[in-house]
Amino acid sequence: MTVDHAKPAAVGADRPAAKRASAPKARRRSDRDGKWWTPWLFLAPALILFVYFKFIPMITAVTMSFQDVQPYLGNQWVGGENYSTVLGDEAFHSAIWHTVVIAIGQTVGSMVIGLALALLMEGQSKRLKFLRSAAFLPVVVPIAVVAELWRIMYHPTEDGMLNSILGMVGLGPSGFINDPDTSMVSVIVTGIWRGAPYDMMIFLAGLAGIDRGLYEAATVDGAGRWRKILHVTLPGLRSVFSILFVLAAIRGLRVFTEVFLLTNGGPNGSTEVAMTLIYKLGLEQNRLGVGAAGAVLLFLATLVLTLFVQVLRRRRDA
């Protein structure tokens, strides 16, 4: 009899406990469900600005690329005529080639120098923290200031800053951005100087994620510094390389400000890139439809490059 009365009592005692345990969960679930909109409320101001200044202009540009834009007179639909004009223009072909050269030069140079700086400045010393902050300054300085600084250093006379240094080693003065033979290299060097510190910080974050035990195992096996970099560091930074390649390539394809301020596409069109040509077509020559078509083509090229790199990365990781 005692056993028979104990079982219902135990079951009855468990029911209030289960209700008490489920009540906080239900309350937490209802609170969470009732505040799903809170993050969107904080994001709303930025999203509104982003839509107004990013997506609406993008949609407008796509529409303009199929029209003969005539301010105050009304736009006329011309279909793919603007795209035919852009694709058949020799100046656009040269601008695309210059853009690709600058993108490759700045991408490779920034990643190589950024990796070298990251390897030199890896550590937790206070002195290294100061050096990393100093090396990162070109990234936070406005690009207009950077371009003006390098334009002054590229002064083509003998008393120019860089020409004075060349004179000390017995080399003649160079025209730099004023010479069609050296203007492209000068623009690339400016981009590398500004982009390498950014890549350095990304590489430092990647180096921090590499297992230190791999370096110790390599040391036990008798590997030197260069073999550690080749067989441990570079494989460990594989994902970082793919991310930086996409970011640097997009940055190179969209290069505009430094070219516009340093050379404005000159001399003789030797540094004319896609963005400066689009700017001139749209705002200087008032051919807004043709300029919009060029911008859409540049966007599509950037999108295809990004998707191509992502597909290669997924296949390699699979």
Image: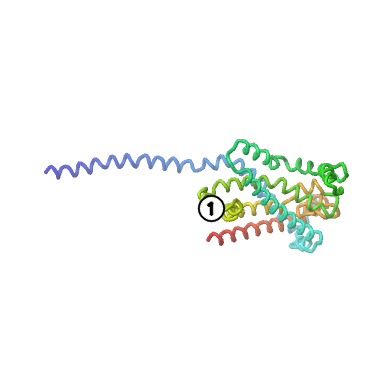
Q: Amino acid at mark 1?
A: Ala
Packing grade of label 1 (10 A; few <14, some 14-19, many >=20) is: some
Question: What residue is at 60 percent from the left and 45 percent from the top?
Answer: 204
Q: Quadrant of residue 307?
A: bottom right
Q: Position of residue 312 (x, y in %)?
A: 59, 61
Q: Secondary structure at mark 1?
A: helix
Please tell me which residue lies in front, 106 or 246.
Answer: 106
Q: Position of residue 41 (x, y in %)?
A: 55, 40
182 relative to 315, above or below: above
Please tell me which residue lies in front, 253 or 62.
Answer: 253
Instruction: In the displayed orientation, state which residue is furthest to the left.
Output: 1
Instruction: In the displayed orientation, state which residue is furthest to the front.
Output: 222
Please tell me which residue lies in front, 217 or 95.
Answer: 217
Q: Position of residue 35 (x, y in %)?
A: 48, 41
For the rendered model, the colour scheme is rainbow
224 relative to 1, above or below: below
Question: What residue is at 74 percent from the left and 43 percent from the top?
Answer: 143
Q: Quadrant of the N terminus?
A: top left
User: Total marks drawn?
Assistant: 1
Q: Position of residue 116 (x, y in %)?
A: 65, 48
Q: Which residue carries the number 1 mark?
A: 218
